[in-house]
Image (cartoon, coloured by chain):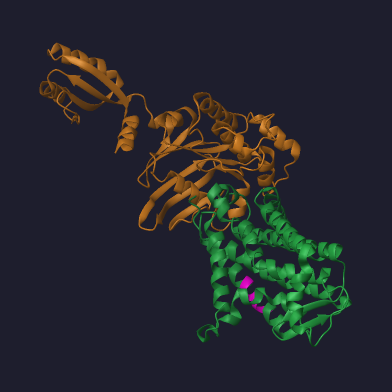
Amino acid sequence: MSEKIIEIKSIAKKFGLFEAVKDVSFHVNQGDVYGFLGPNGAGKSTTIRCMLSLTKPDSGTIKIFGKSIFTDRNEILSRTGSIIEKPDFYKYLSAYKNLEIFSRLSRVSVGKKEIYKMLDFVGLGGREQDKFSSFSHGMKQRLGIAQTLLHNPDLIVLDEPTTGLDPQGIIDIRNLILRLKNEQHKTVILSSHNLAEIEIICNRMVIINKGVSVVEGDVKALMNSEDLVVRLEVSDKNKSKALIMNQYPNIQITDINETSIELPMEKSKISELNKDLVNAGIGIFSIEAKRKLEDYFIKMVNA
Amino acid sequence: MIFIKSIYNEVIKIALKPRSYLGIAAITVLVGVILFALKSDGMSIISFVTSSFEQTLSFEGNVLNGNLVAFIILQMLIVQIPLLIALVTGDLVSGEAAMGTIRMLLTQPISRTSLLLSKFIAGGIYTLMVIVWLGFMSVIMGKMLFGTGDLMVLNSDGLVILQEADVNWRYLGGFLVAFLALFTVSSLSICLSCFTDNSIGPIVTTMSIILLFTIIGTLDVHVFDSVRPFLLTTHMASWRSFFEDPLPIQDIKNSILILFIHNVFLISISIYVFNKKDITA
């Protein structure tokens, strides 16, 4: 069994009367690329801020590398690299100078050569002396990643690193994260409100909504492509419902509108259902299948 | 070691921020204007002061010398310097919050207390630089342009004449006390900076407090008598005590103690607030 790098138990945080985080628990194993998924305002950033001691939770425990963030903060942060929301640097300083400033605060010696190498690694080679204020959003993100990796951390926390990037920028960041996992065996936490992104990159994930962690587990298991939610648009809704109830007595059918219903169903049974409805003389205008978790997440985001 | 590096970082940040040079530039221009005015028509200004003593005293030698010029400059500018200090130091914490860099800094393996103390020290170094520049522009440039001589100072007790050889150490002492007073302004603005995420607020608030305290200190109203000895602004003028004869040592010690207590108090509050602060910016 892999070593637990992060253990978060029942953390809660209020800002005035607003409960940003109510009850979040999860754990991250060594080598995981761990997805931290939730709609905007779910409490992802607050949880990450608590993990990195930027805010203190009102209750709960946070252990990273087996140590409490409240008592061993500096030791934990010396092994952690992070970007929270967006990388903000000193606008009046160059990319090189910015990295030099932050590298001085790390516990490992980082020289000029390493800074240049890192800037090259993230695709900012040749722009070392350009001021941060002249950088595009994508370049700022890359500089943020360079700062995150500069002291060779064991744990990397990336809060929405692809927000605002163009498609090529998103692909580059994804590839970079996969390289960190595969080549350098880093543990990465990736916060995102994009389920597809988490599915592509992560091996484990937690879904957080309204300040509560609702689902946690293996991405492949959670995103089981056999377990679907099917939406049918039919010519006779009531007749369709009766037929389905007859075939699958325990199924839960949801009315969507005058002509549409929704029901959970395994992938292999959809064609059979289609055939039964057609044989019963019911016209089918459309069949739309979504994975159960995807459907759940979309409903959560739209709520 | 990280603490030393953090102080170095803070000094570098101040040194590379264009705003930091506003203070130096302002002193250069202001002192330049005063030097030009005194060089052009300084004697008429001096005559205005000495005319009231002419029936009992006769003045000989170079009255308008570098020592007097430096004294006049200090007296005129010491009120403006806090603004120049607050302009830079009031931004040291809140400016980081406004830029978002505070998030990046506080996810580094340095304690919040160390980070904040390094900002206080860097603010102190900047204040020292401003004072040194003011000293250079007033004392050194003054002596270069006007020569040297005895210093004639008019204070509330009358006219004090200090021998030329007796002046330099008084300037040194005066600048040291002025530094302590301005460092207190720096501490006040950094302390206010810990309460907010906007970069202008602490600068304006620092100046408002200094203005308010100056008004309280100037108003000859009994109700403020018990407060006045403890106001920062009362002791900002303590540098002048070095130009009295005999030297009011007890008053100077008292000012140093009160300014020191102000600093300890402001730094302690800042550390408490900064350590409790939720970084949401």
User: Farthest residue toward the front?
Assistant: B55
Does residue A5 sit above or below B236 in this rendering? above
Residue at the image position 83 percent from the left and 68 percent from the top = B66
Residue at the image position 87 percent from the left and 70 percent from the top = B148
Report how many numbered discs are placed on residues in the image.
0
In this view, the residue in front, A286 or B72, is B72
- Where residue B242 sits: x, y (%)? 76, 78
For the C terminus of chain A, which image quadrant?
A: top left
- Which image quadrant for residue B23? bottom right
| Left or right position of B171 against A86 | right
- Which image quadrant for residue A302? top left
- Where residue B178 sits: x, y (%)? 71, 70
Our reading of the magenta stretch's main secondary structure is: helix
Q: Which color has been applied to chain A in this rendered view?
A: orange
Is B94 magenta? The answer is no
Is B260 magenta? The answer is yes
Residue B2 shows in this picture: no
Q: Which color has been applied to chain B in this rendered view?
A: green
- Where residue B89 sits: x, y (%)? 62, 59
- Where residue B158 sits: x, y (%)? 73, 85
Residue A26 shows in this picture: yes
In this view, the residue in front, A208 or B152, is B152
Residue at the image position 55 percent from the left and 80 percent from the top = B219
- Which image quadrant for residue B185? bottom right
The part of the chain drawn in magenta is B257-263
| Left or right position of A216 against B207 | left
